[in-house]
Image (tube, helix red, strand yellow):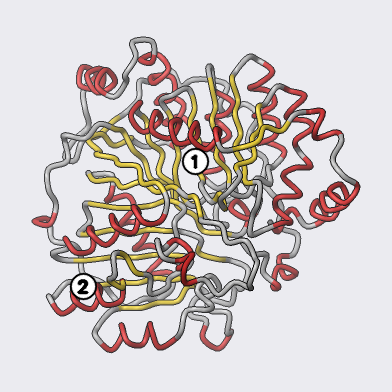
Amino acid sequence: MSVLILGTLAGCASVPQVDPAVGHAISAQAPRIESRTRPLSSAEIRQIIAAITLAPGENALLRHHLAIEQAVIGGPLVAGETTRLLRNGPPTFRAIFAAIASARQRIDLEYYIFQDVESDGQHIGDLLLAKRQQGVEVNILYDDFGSLVTPDAFFKRLQRAGVHVVGFNPLNPFEARAGYHPNHRDHRKILIVDGTTAIVGGVNLANEYQANYLTKSTNAPGEEILPWRDTDIQIAGPAVRQLEALFMAHWRAQHGPSLPEIAPGAEEPGAQGNSVVRFIGSTPDHTVPRYYVTLVSALRSAERRITIEAAYFVPTPDETHALADAAGRGVDVELIVPATSDSGLALAVGRSHFGQLLKAGVHIYEREGVILHSKAVTVDGVWSVIGSSNFDHRSIVFNDEVDAIVIGSDTADGLEAMAAADRRLARQVTLHRWHHRSIKERLKESFGKLVQNLL
């Protein structure tokens, strides 16, 4: 995460407040869930709930979070989704490359950082060119700031072959197509193939995620090189249509070339999945971003446990209070953050909040040996979110983000297992240790708080 030099242009943007009543009351209506073709009956919804919970006692919790999710966001949830968690760069790249290779009609990519990464010896540029030669349509939307170091020659090579390439909010005002908004960034990480399969999460198409990055790094001699620890999720099923709509809205807003609709024949039956899913696209254009509302609501509604892996922990007042209140009412709240980060300022600001959270009973761990870049939250073992949104102000105020809300035990259990593995390689932060931090650390925290609205 970088703070833009242009952040000084941010003006008086501030974090919105989530209605204090949101998340404390359950909608009286039964949740609405759709399949690919129609709304489901009450009996079918009961069958789905039974199928996507692993423990008998989780049925009531799942119903609780289904109702909260619908009351907060509105509109139906989508059943029949097949999900697969992807841990770290190499497995995620293999899944991305395999999905691209399987494309028959169209490939849409939207990434904050877009570089010519490789997986198992193959570069993504070569793979996309090969698919274009097969007649597959390829569309790329990249963030102009996030991809600043990507050579122009890479994108021009793709364009010459017929790939559509659009830069989001160019930093050069003479290249801007949708008004000049240098601090409004596209932080999303999205792959969509044929409108039926998608991969989202925290993994950029960036060189640091490659399996061979450590051996090819140009870091200074003696400088420690840490691997990046991140999480993505692959989803197949009818909910991918929601993600396709988000991509198309961004594409049109940036005045990308007209794209044809995906032919219905490209879709495959999606009724065999094990999860209920909703994709949420957030943007500064929303008075209160939808992801922020649903996250705070889930935290406020927690009954048993909350597990968070946060790459950049710069919590808002609503988030801080929701975590402290949950711990205070007996919810097991676990927070895993990096011990080392590419944003030392964000790290310092996050630590400045530890005292309040530790006193409330939150368990805090700092993951060592990696750059923790994961953005994942689970609540009560049935509600999960994986996406591009950080636990910070910038994701709420300045960035366009995308997140997958997944309701079902399989995904939650998988994320909690990943968190448990990270916790074993972390050092726990105690109140005693926090109180005895150095003067230097305290000064960093104080400085960081001055600019935390930009982090």
Callout 2: few (<14), some (14-19), or many (20+) C-alpha neighbours within 10 Å? many
Determine whether label 2 and label 1 are within 8 Å by CB: no
- For image coordinates 63% across by 59% down, the residue present is 342
Amino acid type, callout 2: Glu
Answer above or below: position of 376 versus 213: above
Q: Quadrant of residue 429?
A: top right
User: Which mark, by number, is residue 289?
Assistant: none
How many numbered marks have been drawn onto this rendered protein structure? 2
* Left or right for 151, reference 366: left
Q: Give the camera-side residue of 213 and 188.
A: 213
Q: Earlier in the sequence, mark 2 or mark 1?
A: 2
Q: Position of residue 252 (x, y in %)?
A: 38, 69
* Left or right for 132, reference 20: left
Residue reaching furthest top? 57
User: Which mark, by number, is residue 376?
Assistant: 1
Residue located beneath label 2 in the image: 137
Between circles 2 and 1, the one closer to the viewer is 1
Residue reaching furthest right? 439
- For image coordinates 51% across by 61% down, the residue present is 187
Residue reaching furthest front? 222
Label 1's element? Answer: strand
Answer above or below: position of 415 versus 305: below
Q: Quadrant of residue 425?
A: top right
Amino acid type, callout 1: Ala
Q: Give the camera-side residue of 339 and 173.
A: 339
Q: Position of residue 121 (x, y in %)?
A: 29, 70
